[in-house]
Amino acid sequence: MLKDTHKYLETKRPWLSIYGTRIRPVHPVGSVSSKLVIDSSLLHRTLPDELLFEVFIRMTPYTLGRAACVCRKWRYAILSPSLWRSACLKAWQTTGLEENEKIVSKIYGGSWRKMWLQRPRLCFDGLFVSRNTYIRAGVVEWKIVNPVHLVCYFRYIRFYPNGKFLYKNSSLKLREVAKLMDGRPSKIESIFGGRYTLANEQVQAAILYPGLRPTVLRFRLRLRGTIPGANNRLDLLSLITSGVNEIEADRVEDVLAATEGWQEDETHNLDVPAVTHGRGLAPFVFVPWEEVETSVLNLPVETMDYYVPG
């Protein structure tokens, strides 16, 4: 009787059988070594290197960095140059294949991974967000004297590898705007499309506001990172609005080229003078898609009155 009771009270722990199983270092994918390596891991015995490589090549570089921490075999496999070559050609696709190959050969010693970590690049798997606040005087009511309001609004930018970007200026929180930035401009949602160029860490961008008096909004930004290779901050160096003529207003898709070489005080429509804005220049912070819902930028102004981007 006691024997049968012990049978039912015993907890099944099938994972205990894998304790003590160590993964031996193996050659990376594509190795020409003839040395026989016996892998004691069940996962690696059932998953061929070729299939593992097909999984890795579909990952983003940030996911590859996390996967490299799983075990030594994955770390060696992720060092494969073809993985980082694919990531680099996508990140700098406007530069072109031949120019990218010259850069990686002359500056980075032929290492695509080194180029990915050290060369300034924009992040495409999320949004750049600039949180701006200012104090506005309120209306005097009854016993309330000198009321003030703390106003909070955001600038949102989503970059694409092909040289295009989306821009939205709104008081809506990050989690709400992220659903709207789906890849195309929308007049209803006040999402405008524009063009940008990246030269070293300098970013030049421009968008065109349509209407009776078309206005071009020109950005000058500086790319930097809180840690080497992060590229997760954009300092807004200047923000200028200028008027454009009828011919330039028709070049919506190429507005950056139409305004190339303009001076800060230059305008081509006397009804719309050039204005250099001195407020609302808080740095942009990059928020990846997986952190949109949990980012502190969703907090109300009552909880976080000021935000230090770092």
Image (cartoon, helix red, strand yellow):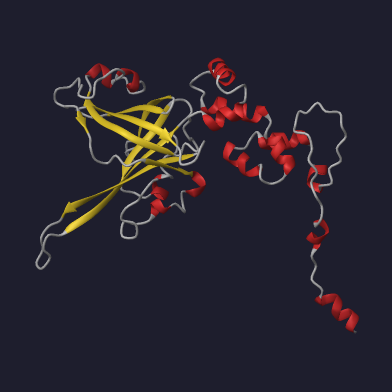
State the residue at coordinates (20%, 21%): 266
Using the image, determine if residue 186 lies above or below residue 301: above
Query: Quick check: 173 left or right of 267?
Result: right
Residue 265, percent across and down?
Answer: 20, 24
> Which residue is found at the position 81% from the left and 55% from the top?
20
Q: Is residue 159 visible?
A: yes
Q: Nearer the viewer, residue 128 or 253?
A: 128
Figure quadrant of the N terminus: bottom right
Number of marks drawn: 0
Which quadrant holds residue 198?
A: top left
Q: Is residue 159 above or below residue 129?
A: above
Percent from the top left, x then y, of residue 35? 87, 32
Q: Residue at x 28, y 32 (%)?
A: 238
x and y percentages locating residue 153 in the rendered image:
30, 47
Quarter where residue 82 is shown: top right
Q: Is residue 275 left or right of residue 222?
A: left
Q: Residue furthest bottom?
A: 1
Quadrant in the picture for the C terminus: top left
- Viewed as shown, does residue 103 lie left or right of 7? left
Q: Is residue 186 visible?
A: no
Residue drawn where x is 78% and y is 40% of the image: 25
Image-based side of 55 in relation to 145, left or right: right
* Residue 50 drawn at (x, y percent): 76, 33
